[in-house]
Amino acid sequence: MQRISVAVSGDLLDSHRRMAEAVAQVARKARDAVDNESDTLDLANCLLNSFPEGLCHLMRTVAEKICIVILANNALKSLTRKFITTFTQLRELNLEGNYFRHLPEDIVTLEHLTNINLARNKFKEFPDQLTHLQSLETINLEANEIVELPIEKLILMPSLKHLNLKGNPINKDDLVLPSPAIKFELIISEDQEQTDATVHL
């Protein structure tokens, strides 16, 4: 029993140490972005289970210069309204490799967003909020659990060029495509040939 207790204590210490290192890494990266007046905030692989509200306050003086936020490979399940109202000038948002099932309604206010990466999350339905983003050009939803697409809404998106849905359980036989053909690249299969401005099934 004593040996087991020692092992468990060691695991807890390792966990606390990793968390402390992750917190220090987040603070360092945020401070670097502020000091360098960078247009990018990269917090990938930082063990985040939520976006630190304190960073919104820390970065308030440079937030409007931040055009790219990378939060890939964390443990995030949602974004707060504070995050969205802080980083209002986002052009690219990378949330790959998290645990998102839904997007917040407020994301429709990111009117400059052109690229969003939601690959390897937990979406079972296509996030409808994305269809309201007029500047959105690229959507990556690879390796989620989406079955159906809101094709009627997607074809009305004026800027959409690329939609990646590889690795989703979409039934191609049930996918009804309007005529004329959709004018964006829709990727569903792993082995499809790619041709600009066409539908790939």
Image (cartoon, rainbow, N blue to C red):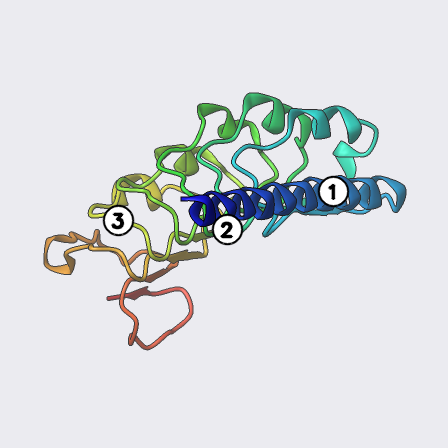
Q: Earlier in the sequence, mark 2 or mark 1?
A: 1
Q: Residue furthest front?
A: 2
Label whose residue precedes the other's in the sequence (3 or 2) = 2
Quadrant in the rendering for residue 102: top left
Q: Which mark is residue 145?
A: 3
The image position of residue 158, as x and y in percent, is 46, 44
Distance between mark 3 and mark 1 Cα atoms = 34 Å
Q: Residue 39 carries which label?
A: none
> What amino acid is labelled 2 in the image?
Glu
Return the residue at label 1: 24
Visible residue check, residue 92: no
In this rendering, position of residue 37 left or right of residue 29: right
Disc on the earlier residue, 3 or 1: 1
- Examine the rendered structure and indicate whether residue 26 appears above or below residue 184: above
* Residue 152 location (% of width, % of height): 26, 41
Badge 1 amino acid: Ala
Amino acid at dot 3: Glu
Front one among 192 and 177: 192
Residue under pointer 2: 137
Q: Distance between the residues labelled 2 and 1?
A: 35 Å
